[in-house]
Image (cartoon, rainbow, N blue to C red):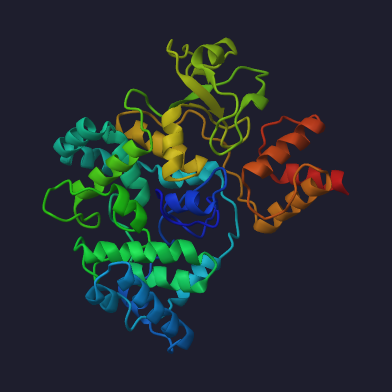
Amino acid sequence: MNAHSPSHSHQTLGILRMSAGLLVAIGMAACSGPAPTQVAVAQTPAQITQSTSPPVDVSFTSWLSQVRADAIKRGISPATANAALTNIAPIPRVIELDNRQPEFSNTFTRYLTNSVTEARVEQGRALMQKHAELLANLEREYGVPARFLVAFWGLETNYGRVTGEYPVVNALATLAHEGRREAFFREEMFNALLILDRGHISLAKMKGSWAGAMGQTQFMPSTFLKHAVDEDRNGHIDIWGSVPDALGSGANYLKSLGWDDERTWGREVSLPQKFDVALASLDVDAKENIMPLSEWSALGVRKVGGDLLPAQDIQASLVLPADIKGPAFLVYGNYRAILKWNRSAFYAIAVGHLADRLSGGVSLAQLGREGDPLRREEIVDLQTGLVALGHMKTADGVMGSATRQAVRAFQKANGLTPDGYTDRAVIAAVKAKAG
């Protein structure tokens, strides 16, 4: 996902993949978990076509007439506007997915084991060899190492295999007309029309996720217009079918996000006994307690295996995606660049770890317990108790940064390990304390 596609919660199990820029744009991201790009159960093109032909919605038809007029006023050719915005209807499945509340949270262990599989690592390594010359050229041009480009490619669309089958303009029109985020999706719809008008892709081939994320990099139309590039130099940009265009566009986008070509993303580390777990960051951007590696070393933090951390002046934050017994990571500036692509700690760690595996790295030393995902109503119960105890303001059913901070405050106040992690024992303790 990159600046481009919505998710009700990065921890949703019912959605496997979406895109990230939209998470930033509409402020819907939580602090750690999947940042999916596609619908879990893929529909066939025939099913999607059938779902676009319900009885005529007069209000939608009238709205669409005004949209066509507005598009032409914006400089879109009448031919493009009429072809794309005539004889279409709202897609019920798109509205259903947009309104769906996540039934479960997700766990880091489950997310990572589903995202960084041995098959995905092997496929990625093979593709790095196949496209070695292209990737080397992109690294020279944009400063983004091959392993990271391929890791994004793998997580976004399984190396271009799952890019979405929804007609993008129709999906965006559906979401704009629905009205909940009309301004955002209306603008993306006009951007999609501009892409068509410039001849980069045909209307029939402009397919994507239910939220309008497109191609092998799952760009929203606005991201495409700002960052997509014609890497194969054939006169049009095709992030759907051209690997050079897709990876070149991804590299150009990462460069714009501030990718530092002299650093990696971070590393798994081991913590000493009785480590002050309150030093770990809980906010999604991992900007709490940023310290140089020398200070983390002085606190007893080590590489996995016990070796000292690098003797370099790198600023780092500590991230615990699970509880204190799970894996620990020191993360650097490129970790935050990944978060700008998809605002999810789970996703950022998965990209970094997959990139490490693609270049010969080993599996994590400490994956953490599997655990059962929390149901939404359990999260609401937790939050309701935390509100009653004065640790947070509202209960929204999303396990985000605010909830983790509130859990940490409760843990500190009650003599528990303040790792901000929630399981059913923590929920029971909160409910008992809140009465």
Asked if 89 appears above or below 243 in the picture, the reply is below
Image spot of residue 385 (x, y percent): 80, 49
Point out residue 404 in the picture as x, y percentages from the top left corner.
66, 40
Relative to 289, say whether 122 is above or below. Answer: below
- In this view, the residue in front, 112 or 192, is 192
Is residue 14 left or right of 131 when viewed as pictured?
A: right
* Position above or below: 330 against 41: above
- Residue 1 visible in the snapshot: yes
In the image, 142 versus 222, the foreground residue is 222
Please report the residue visible at 49 percent of the width from the left and 71 percent of the height from the top: 95
Front residue (pair 275, 117): 275
In the rendered structure, the answer to whether residue 26 lies left or right of residue 225 reads: right
Residue farthest along the front direction in this orientation: 73
Q: Is residue 167 visible?
A: no
Q: Residue at x 28, y 67 (%)?
A: 75
Rendering quarter of residue 417: top right
Furthest-left residue in view? 234
Residue 137 in picture, x, y percent from top left: 17, 34
Question: In terms of depth relative to the viewer, which is nearer, 368 or 337?
Answer: 337
Q: Give me the residue at 23% from left, 32% from top.
A: 139
User: Residue 199 at what x, y percent from top left?
Assistant: 19, 63
Q: How many marks?
A: 0
> Which quadrant of the view contains residue 371?
top right
